[in-house]
């Protein structure tokens, strides 16, 4: 029976926050928020926009296109002639690019075929734009008959002297060429155009038109990582030699730009000489991402029925102080136990024990146990060296939270607050949308009012669910999917146990680095795939070399921190060898135990958190 007082429709969290891929959004441009680096993409030089899945590359690149600019202007045709640049968006489709490979033809022939295909695609985009422009600003910019004939001849199409007919001829020629690929006859190759030449001449002809005098033309290539290696060489060559008539804006996942040389193996693309690299994670790191994410989420939240007008998304995600979180996690129970022990062992410290903050007292107990001191000796040290003790308390406050409910069922740590969520998102706009959307959904299911603060417990459960969801999706993301899942399960368990047992090592171990001597060897493809698919995030270590993956520090992406129950903060690190990393994939049970034993930890002492129970077979499988 329907509740008569129930709302007609639940708040559309799935619409506002659940749709985070640019390809799915029907109102993409209405929800667009310009990131701080956007003006750099609007310059006339080649740019490479690098970032992981969900960092907003596609949204930004689509907004650079002429369709995007038109939508952002409110579809105001009067603005079109005043734009300083016109961009042509093209997404690399795996179905298309993989058709240009096989044993039927030699490598050099495949290269020429793909170069011709690119000519058709790029020229088609330019002519489609010209026809679109003519529909918005009639009779102001059309190619003359000679230019149309030249382009059609260079592309080996039926000759035409009309711009509209040229566009139709290019589409027909592209369809014929694709049909040829599907019915490949090595002895009957079609006529092919020279790489880049038709594009150069077409763009030159466009810029000679009065309407485009002084304007810039952008070819916007998204998902560059989908190109085969030799195809990346072809695009690299075009980028290197694009000249004055057009430039490129490239979107690529980190580690997805595998080949940096052109078709000339001795010619490399180098930043900043040949292109401007814009690393999204670096450009939005810290406070810029916090502000950008707030703008994006608040823009989406305003469409939720009942959300306060002018309300800030951060207001519905209240944080906890460390002391308040400790209370929620049961520190008072430990205080009672410790005070009883003080009464028995060192009653002279009874008054101090009952007057200092709970976490301070808990640290006294923790330190005495882990350093083989009596409670009295620890109190005496605390009193004799107050500055040293204050530093110790500051270093151990957060790590101690993970021990308060260790080995107990239920939530063992709380992940709450806007800044905690932005930190867990790791500068990834898709992840912050997932976290906020899931928290709002749980809040609604719990009977909470739209716009009211969400409890820390519900925020934590939302973060756990998002981590579980992204773990489940890993297998379908890559040919390395199964390996990445095992790697993540292994590293997650290791950092979870280390968080539960902070004694005996530096607190908050959340990163790892590779031992210096052995090369990565077999582990290299796994590490590259883990970074590309956001299993791991990396940061510059002591030196920087794009060719040496050991020059970085690594951490499990913080989006998984709540699911595995370790700190989302990037702190201290341990050393792992490439062999140990591969062991987590090949023999996970023995590899986890071996790594933990090297840190003086025994995995069996700490049962799996309830959210990891589903993977008990993985962790307790054969040695």
Image (cartoon, helix red, strand yellow):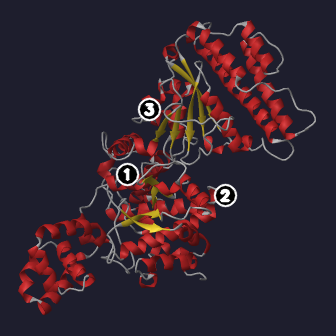
Counting the numbered discs, the total is: 3
Res. 319 image quadrant: bottom left
Nearest the camera: 305 or 3? 305
**Residue 259 rendering spot, x and y as whole percentages:** 63, 43
Q: Nearer the viewer, residue 100 or 130?
A: 100
The residue mark sitting in front, 1 or 3, is 3
Q: Tell me: residue 132, above or below residue 93.
A: above
Residue at the image point whose x is 78% and y is 12% from the top = 149
Residue furthest to the bottom: 344
Residue at 28 percent of width and 67 percent of height: 398
Label 2, label 1: how far apart the Cα atoms are: 30 Å
- Of marks 3 and 2, which one's residue comes earlier in the chain? 3
Find residue 140 and report its horizontal and vertical position in percent. 60, 7
The residue carrying pointer 1 sits among few (fewer than 14), some (14 to 19) or many (20 or more) residues within 10 Å by Cα, namely many
The tag earlier along the polypeptide, 2 or 1, is 1
User: Which of the image's four quarters has the C terminus?
Assistant: bottom right
Q: Are marks 1 and 3 in contact (CB under 8 Å)?
A: no
Q: Is residue 106 left or right of residue 547?
A: right
User: In the image, is 259 to the left or to the right of 49?
Assistant: right
Q: Secondary structure at mark 3?
A: helix
Where is residue 128? Give x, y as percent: 67, 21
Whether residue 134 appears in this view of the structure is no
Question: For this rendering, which residue is in front, 231 or 75?
Answer: 231
Q: Earlier in the sequence, mark 1 or mark 3?
A: 3
Q: Quadrant of residue 331?
A: bottom left
Look at discs 2 and 1 and give the one toward the viewer. 2
Location of mark 2 (residue)? 479
Q: Which residue is mark 1?
A: 422
Q: Label 1, label 3: how many angstroms apart (C-alpha)?
A: 20 Å
Q: Label 2: few (<14), some or many (≥20) within 10 Å?
A: few
Residue position marked by numbered label 3 in the rendering = 38
């Amino acid at each position: 029976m329907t509740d008569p007082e129930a709302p007609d429709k639940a708040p559309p969290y799935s619409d506002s926050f659940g749709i985070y891929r640019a390809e799915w959004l029907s109102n993409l441009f209405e929800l667009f928020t310009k990131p701080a680096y956007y003006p750099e993409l609007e310059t006339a030089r080649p740019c490479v926009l690098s970032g992981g899945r969900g960092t907003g590359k596609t949204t930004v690149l689509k907004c650079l296109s002429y369709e995007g600019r038109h939508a952002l202007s409110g579809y105001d045709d009067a603005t079109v002639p005043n734009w300083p640049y016109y961009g042509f968006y093209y997404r690399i489709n795996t179905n298309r690019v993989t058709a240009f490979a096989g044993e039927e033809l030699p490598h050099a022939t495949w290269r020429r075929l793909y170069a011709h295909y690119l000519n058709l695609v790029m020229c088609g985009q330019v002519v489609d734009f010209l026809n679109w422009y003519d529909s918005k600003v009639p009779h102001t910019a059309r190619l003359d008959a000679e230019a149309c004939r030249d382009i059609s001849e260079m592309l080996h199409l039926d000759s035409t002297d009309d711009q509209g007919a040229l566009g139709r001829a290019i589409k027909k020629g592209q369809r014929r060429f694709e049909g040829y690929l599907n019915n490949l006859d090595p002895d009957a190759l079609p006529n092919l155009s020279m790489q880049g030449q038709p594009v150069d001449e077409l763009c030159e002809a466009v810029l000679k038109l009065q309407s485009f005098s002084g304007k810039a033309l952008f070819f916007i290539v998204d998902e560059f990582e989908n190109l085969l290696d030799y195809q990346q060489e072809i695009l690299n060559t075009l980028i290197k030699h694009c000249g004055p008539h057009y430039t490129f804006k490239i979107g690529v996942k980190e580690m997805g730009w595998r080949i940096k040389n052109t078709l000339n193996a001795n010619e490399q693309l180098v930043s900043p000489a040949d292109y401007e690299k814009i690393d999204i994670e670096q450009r939005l790191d810290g406070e810029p991402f916090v502000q950008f994410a707030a703008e994006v989420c608040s823009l989406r939240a305003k469409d939720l029925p009942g959300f306060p007008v002018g309300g800030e998304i951060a207001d519905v995600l209240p944080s906890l102080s460390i002391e308040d979180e400790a209370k929620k996690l049961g520190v008072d129970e430990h205080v009672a136990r410790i005070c009883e022990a003080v009464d028995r062992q060192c009653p002279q410290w009874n008054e101090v024990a009952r007057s200092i903050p709970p976490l301070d007292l808990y640290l006294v107990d923790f330190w005495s146990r882990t350093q083989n001191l009596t409670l009295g000796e620890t109190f005496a040290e605390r009193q004799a060296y107050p500055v040293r003790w204050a530093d110790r308390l500051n270093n151990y406050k957060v790590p101690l939270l993970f021990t308060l409910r260790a080995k107990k069922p239920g939530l063992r740590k709380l992940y709450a607050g806007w800044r905690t969520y932005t930190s867990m998102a790791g500068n990834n706009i898709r992840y912050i949308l997932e976290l906020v959307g899931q928290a709002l959904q749980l809040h609604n299911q719990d009977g909470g009012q739209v716009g009211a603060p969400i409890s820390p417990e519900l925020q934590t459960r939302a973060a756990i669910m998002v981590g579980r969801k992204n773990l489940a999706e890993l297998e379908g993301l890559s040919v390395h999917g199964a390996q990445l899942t095992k790697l993540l399960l292994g590293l997650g368990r290791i950092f979870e146990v280390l968080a539960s047992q902070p004694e005996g090592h530096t607190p908050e171990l959340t990163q790892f680095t590779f031992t210096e001597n052995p090369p990565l060897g077999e582990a290299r493809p796994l590490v590259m795939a883990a970074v590309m698919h956001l299993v791991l995030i990396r940061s510059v270590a002591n030196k920087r070399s794009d060719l040496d993956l050991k020059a970085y520090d690594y951490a499990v992406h913080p989006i998984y921190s709540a699911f595995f129950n370790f700190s989302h903060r990037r702190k201290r690190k341990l050393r792992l060898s490439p062999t140990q990393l591969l062991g987590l994939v090949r023999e996970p049970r023995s590899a986890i135990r071996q790594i933990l034993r090297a840190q003086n930890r025994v995995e069996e002492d700490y049962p799996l958190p309830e959210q990891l129970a589903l993977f008990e077979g993985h962790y307790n499988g054969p040695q």
